[in-house]
Amino acid sequence: MKAAVSLALAAAAVHAAPAAAFLPPLRNQFLPRLAGIGDPGHVALTFDDGPNPLSTPHFLRLLDAQQTRATFFVLGSQVARAPGLAREIADAGHELGVHGWEHRCLLRYGPRRVHDDLARACEVIEQASGHRPQWIRAPYGVFSTSALMAAHRLQLEPVLWTCWGFDWTAQATGPSVLRTVLKDLRGGGTVLLHDSDHAASVGSWRSTLAALGPLLEVCARRGLRVGPLADHAVRPVSVMVAQARRLDPGVQVGRGFHAGLR
Ligand SMILES: [Zn+2]
């Protein structure tokens, strides 16, 4: 159980996939804020690894047609290459969160490098979009203690996901992405998808795009509102820590973890 609140344990999860969950069921149970669990009548829709001029505009068009807003966890280096696209995302009413400067596991870097990379990413996002990012999702979902400390200093809220589409592989299809998301989708959940193949199989975003319309339909049928993390009302960290302690009074919430989540 203590392992569930140690955010530095995820080294083994670092592989080629653009996202890696460490102990997702435990995470959802014990770290609801980190998992992005919020308003039970709402689903937070999030996209990682963009912006990408080839793929992101397709998502923006579909979301606009569906009058749906989302949170885009962007890479600073990608925003630097396409600042106009980052502005377009923000102007369409979507949120921009930080996904790092480059798509590299943050465990590779020391405290100073992590902080400088995240600060640089925040700056380029703010310059391009006019908005200071509020959220951070580390590449591969792997937060080191240094990353959490840096996030705290930069006033970024770490958030992962409760379900994903496994949409980054060459084998993914629209139906497979939809099926995978729906397997774990509940009201209050946070969905991880990718609007870019930057760290995935070439063209994999097309499967994600194919799944998006049907996913929004299912949510509407279930009476679930879909929107960005800003509208998701994630529970305060005090509730989260109290819950973890109730379940295991001996649980140690590390300094980096506690500070990182405020
Ligand atoms: Zn990613």
Image (cartoon, rainbow, N blue to C red):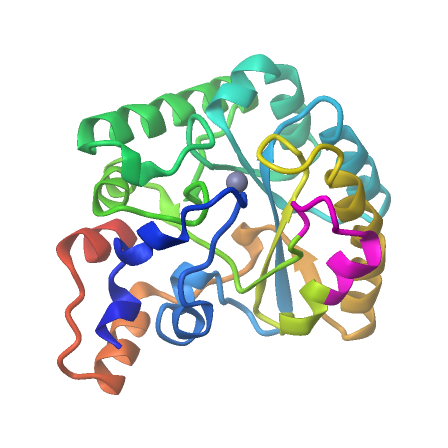
Residue at x 28%, y 24% (from the top left corner): 116
Give how far across and how far down residue 66 sits, in percent: 83, 49
Residue at x 44%, y 31% (from the top left corner): 132
| Quadrant of the image containing the C terminus | bottom left
Q: Is residue 227 left or right of residue 156?
A: right
Give how far across and how far down residue 253 sits, in percent: 18, 65
Residue at x 29%, y 54% (from the top left corner): 261
Front residue of 99 and 140: 140
Above or below, comparing residue 109 to residue 44 in the picture? above
Give how far across and how far down residue 1 sits, in percent: 26, 77
Whether residue 170 is in magenta: the answer is: yes
Q: Is residue 186 left or right of residue 159?
A: right
Whether residue 52 is in magenta: the answer is: no
Q: Is residue 20 left or right of residue 194?
A: left
Magenta-drawn segment: 167-179
Above or below, comparing residue 161 to residue 145 in the picture? below
Residue at x 49%, y 62% (from the top left corner): 233
Front residue of 160 and 226: 160
